Image: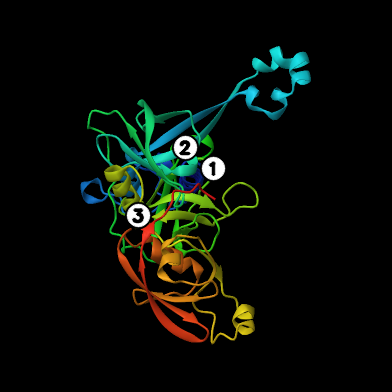
Amino acid sequence: MKRLWYIFAQAVTLSVAVLFAVQALKPGLLTSDGSSAAPSRDVAILQAAPSSGGARNVASFADAAQKAVPAVVYIFTSQEVKASNQPLMNDPLFRHFFGDQLDQQDQSHSSLGSGVIVSADGYILTNYHVVEAADKIEVATNNGQKFKAKVVGADPESDMAVLKIDANGNLPVITFAPSDSLRVGDVVLAIGNPFGVGQTVTSGIVSALGRSHLGINTFENFIQTDAAINPGNSGGALVDSNGNLVGINSAIYSQSGGSMGIGFAIPVSLAHSVLDQIIKNGAVTRGWIGVEVQQITPEIAESFGMPNSDGALIAGIMKGSPADKGGVKTGDVLLAVNGKPISDSQTMIEQIAALVPDSKAKLRVRRAKKEIVLDITIGKRPQTQRR
């Protein structure tokens, strides 16, 4: 009896040992479905549930880009440079030895830029400096179509130009934002063809509005942005977060040639005005009185005994000009035009330019410490080249 009990105890002990070993080494053998009865050591991953309707709940400006990108084009320009136009080519001795070779060295210089389609029949807005002096202009749309383009009109003083391509009236068109809709801090996208790499969208915010006195154009009212603008972006679109056009990318501040976070765009209000005038009249018409003005510095104001530095100092007058006929004198300080105060020389130029030629204007000036009002007939501003 004791022997049987001893054998039973050994069997139980051996069975328990086997079960313990299996549990430790092969836990999956002890479950009917092959799964482990031991606690899982896998890391728990939180999986987001898909949104209803497939919508993406992420911060994205894809819709704005998708709306605006098709209306932004590449602009390729070329300029033929003939060796015969170089100064040495007219030297008889130089041409005697090298003329035949040099006549064969005519070259073609190419450049890149961007533009914005503003009408389905092919009107395109771009910068004047993109197409300046170009002999040939080719436009390529975002879907690969290519067109020859011609310049309808240009305004060098605002650095704007209007091109025309022959299209069938089915081109994608940019939507203009309201002129007063932009605020500092708004998100904007810059769209263009930087360095010729292809259609590119960069993002940033509006850093400042109404930037002037930069010495870029005669008429300046720039939008400043930190959206990356590089060579090749000129003439491209600056759009808001809804994909509406707020400006035409025009210039950058850079010490390296690339973007440093300070870019400038011509506001849509100015671009729209230039576009309308060029399409209707072939040119932009502005007011003019024929004076040379000088900024009044605190030093000048002190030396002339002026009460402050407001206004624009008349430094010169063109003979026979509207100012000359209206009695303006050298040394006068222009204080207001039609009741609108003049803060500096740039403001004076812009206010006079906004007047309609042949219209009447009242100029309030300070002369010998007395203020007088002069009646002037506004003239037409002569066409000038971009500075």
Residue 379 found in image quarter:
bottom left
Of pointers 3 and 2, the one earlier in the residue sequence: 2
Residue 230 visible within the image: yes
Which residue in the structure is indicated by mark 1? 231
Q: Position of residue 150 (x, y in %)?
A: 38, 31
In the drawing, what numbered circle is on residue 268?
3
Question: Is 202 positioned to the left or the right of 270 in the image?
Answer: right
Q: Position of residue 285 (x, y in %)?
A: 35, 52
Of pointers 2 and 1, the one earlier in the residue sequence: 2
Which residue in the structure is indicated by mark 2? 131
Task: Identify the residue shown where x is 36% and y is 32%.
Answer: 141
| 3 vs 2, front mark | 2
Residue 59 visible within the image: no
Please report contact status of discs 3 and 2: CB closer than 8 Å, yes or no. Answer: no
Q: Position of residue 34 (x, y in %)?
A: 37, 39
> How far apart are the alpha carbons under marks 3 and 2?
20 Å
Task: Identify the residue shown where x is 67% and y is 28%.
Answer: 86
Residue 267 found in image quarter:
bottom left
- Return the residue nearer the eye: 190 or 78: 78
Disc 1 secondary structure class: loop
Give amino acid for label 2. Val
Disc 2 secondary structure class: helix
> How far apart are the alpha carbons under marks 2 and 1?
14 Å
Question: Is 242 positioned to the left or the right of 225 in the image?
Answer: left
